[in-house]
Structure formats: structure tokens, C-alpha cells
Amino acid sequence: MKTTAVILAAGQGTRMRSKLPKILHPLAGKPMVSYTLEATTRVTGEKPVLVIGHGAEQTQQVVGEAASYVVQENQLGTGHAVMQAESVLSGKTDLVLVLYADMPLVRAETLQRLVEAQVQNSGPVTLLTVIADDPHGFGRVLRGPGGEVLAVVEEAQATAEQKKITELNAGFYCFRADWLWQALKRIQLSPKGEYYLTDIVEIAVQDGYRVQARVIEDRTELIGINNRLHLAEAEAVMRYRINTEWMLRGVTIIDPQTTYIEPGVTIGQDTVIWPNTYLQGNTTIGEECTIGPNSLLRDTRVGSQCKVFSSVLEKAVLEDHVDMGPFGHLRKGAHLADGVHMGNFGEVKNSYLGPGTKMGHFSYIGDATIGTEVNIGAGTITCNFDGSKKNHTDIGPNVFIGSDTMLVAPVSLGEGARTGAGAVVTKDVPSHTLVVGVPARPLRKLEKLD
């Protein structure tokens, strides 16, 4: 049966106290709505319908083509929100899966079980419930003497006796589509001036149908985000899930509570992640690496058997057997080939360091191509910016750069060239030539490197 999800995302989210629409607030590095979109798409195989209102334009810009959109112009409740989807779904789907965009922790597997339960249900609706002593504002599920579901009562309308009920409405539903559209029109306006979707349960019972309920075991899936406290709570749950998965796959995480790994990251077996490490974006790490402590990797590819200690890597590439840090910084376009060593307080941007190259501490390499087995002394700087454009530096294999050398680009150094300490190189250096001084000048020709 064809199933399409309707995700409710029109609320103002005033308790977030933010200019950013609530559903766009990041959770583990991604807008919270993206988790719901991904989960429903996995289950249904169809593009979900996102009901938007507050911040509609901004939401569409972020979500893009991952969803279809309908706008709830007036905020008249959850029942009214689902009504907006009729115009795009009527006659086009068999089942409608309804859920909220601010409940991003629900698993696709849970939604799949909900849909499967409705497929087997002779009635028009199946909902998820949870047993909990702390209601968190959820509506109460009323059952008859035989255990049948009779209705869902919102907390605001519940009597003192009904508030003692511990079975709560989780807010996830699967409806038979043809029945849903006509039933929505029969919801009565609440005392608050809203049309509650929960009233549709009682309408189904009045029609003589059996309403099916499935109890969800993991309460963390039901965390709804209404303020920054809830966001932090959800962040902790997501971090626990991600870290647990990687540890079960063979990654050692020394302290999961202080390790932050985003969903798009991949990590090889026998890699060790030390505390206060942040792995973000599309970062890929190979096998048998040591990352951290106190490191941040964003959109970076790391090979196997690498060591990154207390450093920041952004949109960089490390091949195998690279070690760097502490306090190194790789910026966009940095590429460290096999066996490169980068010392403390070094920075590389838009440059390639060839295999076996050693980069001393307190150095900056920008817009450069460096050959194999090059020694870059402490304090070396490629002076790549002339005030209007960036210029390139080329360094051949087996070059020895003395400490505090200034390489004023554009400039090139041939194979086996050397610079003396403190040299300011403003002209190309031929192969196997030693240059010294300010500005640097050839001192002698070298037969070979020692």
C-alpha cells in the first residue's frame, strides 16, 4: 500500500526565543527537521508533505526538494494542519503517516512498525502510545473495560481523574487516507479555538471502528523540542546513539560523554577517539587512527594509521601514516600525503605536502606544492598574498628549508635546494643550490644533500 507522510511544522516555536524557525535549529549538526524527513522517506519511499507556516520561506530554502509543501496560513490546531495536506494527497495515497517535525528522535524502525500495524488493522487509524508517570504535557489515552481505545484527551481538557492515566498519546499516527479526509471535517472546535487531531480517535470509535494502539518502549524517541533545554536533552540522546553505534562497530571512544560525532561521519575499525573531539560534516576516518584529545575535524578525509593531536582540520585530506599536532590547523584545500609529519602550531591552507615531508613547528604553508621528503624548518612562512592576489610556491623534492625562511611567492625551489636560517627568498632557487641572506642569494652549488 502506498504510504505518504505528513509532517507538521507550522508552529511558531516561541519558547525557543529565536529568530530561527524551531525546526531548523541544529541537532548533532543538522536541522532537526532533517531527521524526520529522512526517517519517513526510508519508511514510505515517498517524498513527505511538510505543513509549514511560521518561517515558511526560510524552511523551504533549507529543506529544498526533500519535501513537498503546504502552508497553514492560520494556526488553528493540529487537525487543521493535517487538513491542509488533503489538496495534494487526496486520491493519491492509501495511508497517511502523521507526525511532528519537532520530535526528531523517532526511529525509522518505529515508524515502520506503526505503518505495518495499520496495514493489518481493519480500522482506519493506528497510533503510538507510551507508558510514563511524567506526562510531559501529552494527552491521555482513554480505554474501555475491555482495553479498547475510546479517545485521547488533551491535558488541558483532562479531568483530575483522567490526568492520573499513565498511558500517553505519543503523537504518531497512521490513517487510512480515504477515511481521514472526511473525518477531519467532523472535528469540533476546542475551547481554545483549535481543531485537535486527537479528537479523530473518538470520531473513529463513534463510527464503530476499532482504534489500534501500539506502545513504544524507548521513551527517548518521544522527546519533543519546545525550548533550548529540550534541544540539549535531544542532543545528548543523539550523541549517545551515534557513539554507541560506533563503539559496537569497533571504534574505541575513551569518553563518550565528551565526544561529539555527527551523523555523516564514518570511522574505521580500531581507531581511538580521545575526549573533547568533534567530528563534523562529511568527515571520514580510516582504520587504526588516534584522534584527539581536543581536536575538531570538519568535512575532512583521514587515511589509516594517522595521529591527530589537539588540532583543527577543515576540508582537508590526510593520506595514511600522517601525524600532526598539537595545535595544528589544516584549512580548506590542505592535503598531507603519506607519512607527512606536521609539528605543533603549524598551519596549512590550499597546499599539497608530498610523501615523507616534515613540517616544523610555528610554520605557515599557503598556496604551495611541496615535493617528497622536504624538510620545512621552524618558523617557515610562504608569503603568498601580495595585497591583491594569492601567489603560488613550488618546492621540489628533497629540499631543506632553514628555520625562519620567508618564501615570497610566486617562487620555486628546485630539487635538493637549501635555504639558510632567516633567508628571505624572493627569486627562484635552482636545484641543489644553497641560498642565504636578505634577500636570499646563492652561496654555493651543492653536489648532493647530506
Image (tube, grey):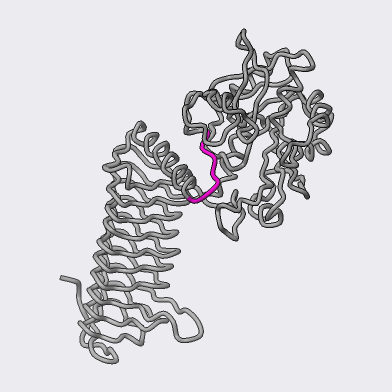
Considering every residue shown, the one lying at the far left of the view is 450
Image position, residue 420 (x, y; %): 21, 82
| Res 238 → quadrant | top left
Does residue 412 appear left or right of residue 175 in this picture?
left
Picture coordinates of residue 428, whole percent (x, y): 36, 83
From the viewer's side, name the closer residue of 409 and 181: 181
First to last magenta residue range: 222-228
Q: As displayed, is residue 81 above or below residue 134?
A: below
On whether residue 226 falls in the magenta region, the answer is yes
Rendered-image quadrant of the N terminus: top right
Residue 184 in the image: state x and y as whole percent.
79, 31
The image quadrant of residue 346 is bottom left
Question: Going by the picture, which residue comes out furthest to the bottom?
Answer: 438
Q: Is residue 426 left or right of residue 174?
A: left
In the image, residue 389 above or below residue 328:
below
Q: Is residue 449 a member of the stretch shown in magenta?
A: no
Query: For the point 32% across and 75% down, which residue is it?
Result: 414
- Relative to residue 344, is residue 10 depicted above or below? above
Q: What secondary structure prevails in the magenta region? A: loop
For the residue pair 253 and 148, the one nearer the viewer reads as: 148
Residue shown at 40%/71% (left/top)? 368
Query: Tag count in the figure?
Result: 0
Q: Is residue 101 left or right of residue 356?
A: right
Q: Quadrant of the C terminus?
A: bottom left
Residue at the front extreme, as displayed: 160
Q: Position of residue 116 (x, y in %)?
A: 63, 19
Q: Residue at x 57, y 28 (%)?
A: 160
